[in-house]
Amino acid sequence: MRDIERRVAVAGAAVVGVAFGMGRFCFGLTLPDLRVDPALSTTGVPDAMLGLIAGGTFAGFLAGIVGVPLLAARRGPRAPTTVGGVCGALGALVVVLAPSPAVLAVGAVLAGSAAGWVWAPYSDLAKVLVAPERRPRLLSFVSTGTCGGLVLVAVVAVAAAGAWRAAWVAVAVCSALAALLNRRWVPAVPPTPVTERAPMPWRALRAPALYAVVYQAGTAVAFTYSADVATRAGLSSGVRPLLFVIIGVLGLAGFSTGAMTARVGPPRVAAGCLLTIAVSLLLLAVGERSPVVALLAAAVFAAPYMVGAATLAVWTGSVAASDPGRALSAAMVVGALGAVLAPIVVGSLVTTLGLPVLLAAVGVLCGLVGAGLVRSRST
């Protein structure tokens, strides 16, 4: 691996790891504790509000995705990654200081937007800085940086012993440090003139976009409610973060995404990810009956979550090699709708239907779409 490739890989993994592994999913990890924090609400934060905030964090993610191509077209693909680091740091700081659910929501949404700003630009950076045959490996490495973020925020949560604001302090600090590293190690790449862009193959992007919708919905629900299920299963606040450690460690399977997609094709890998996520959600649906089942659900979820994220980057890059960043952004914009709506729908219906039924329903949806992709001939 050349020095420039190594630097981009490490800096990108750090930025994506903090934005995704920490900022985007810290709300779900801290949800059981902030729900009953009297400093936020003397009567407790209701489920509908929690679902709305969770959906809002993914709405912030969507806003970041939309902003990426606009900013990258003017300042180059590194600029959005810097904006993402700033959003992550400021948003987490607002959460730390939040005196009410409304202020917390603003900070969580801003922190959630960081993930939208930072992911797609690395496809364009890889296009300019890395040889074509090495791009899938680089993108797999960058995407799998999320594992480190998940483990780190979980370790902080354990050390904080239920002080949920401490986890958000870690998000703020790490966001700033990752942004500084990225500015130092990733070269500034000039924007691609609009006149030089090839037409986007929208028809070929339909299958990745469908996959993105269901994948984002499934993972958003899993991360939002896994700690809640673990709490109902009897895991204490000091043990619950083990869920994120499991996902982070086993999610290192994402490093092999490049090899897997080269061997069987991105659609087949994507299908396998959705089918496995379906199994994990079905386990999570019955997880409150046993802490062992709740932990098993996290273990099953880990690899398809990380492989699934990297697969989307590889898949969109393979169907739109001339403009991979814009292709990934397009698929993520559509996919983010699933991430926004799924937690809101679950939060609004949980008192009526119960969380297990809703988790199972999302799992079945993932399974059905995954089964459909098995038959796909898309590349």
Image (spheres, rainbow, N blue to C red):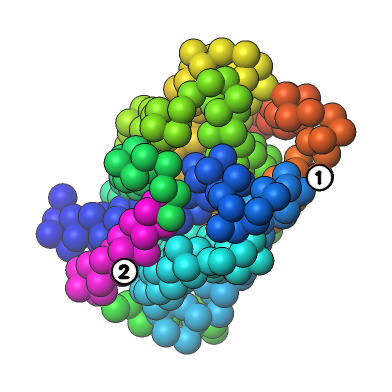
Classify mark 2: residues with Cα within 10 Å, few (<14), some (14-19) or many (20+): many
Residue holding disc 1: 348
Give residue 269's position: percent from left, percent from top.
51, 31
- The answer for how far apart the CA atoms under marks 1 and 2 are is 35 Å
Give residue 134's position: percent from left, percent from top.
29, 49
Residue holding disc 2: 176
Give residue 58's position: percent from left, percent from top.
62, 56
Which of the numbered marks, if any, corresponds to residue 240? none
Residue shown at 44% from the left, 72% from the top: 90
Is residue 355 left or right of 147 when viewed as pictured?
right
Q: Check if residue 171 falls in the magenta segment.
A: yes
Q: Which residues are magenta?
A: 166-187
Residue shown at 37% from the left, 40% from the top: 161
Q: Secondary structure at mark 1?
A: helix
Classify residue 32 by image quadrant.
top right
Classify mark 1: residues with Cα within 10 Å, few (<14), some (14-19) or many (20+): some
User: Of the residues tagged 1 and 2, which is closer to the observer?
Assistant: 1
Q: Please, is residue 217 above or below residue 291 in the view?
A: below
Give residue 262's position: percent from left, percent from top.
41, 35
Residue shown at 42% from the left, 42% from the top: 162
Q: Secondary structure at mark 2?
A: helix
Amino acid type at image mark 2: Ala
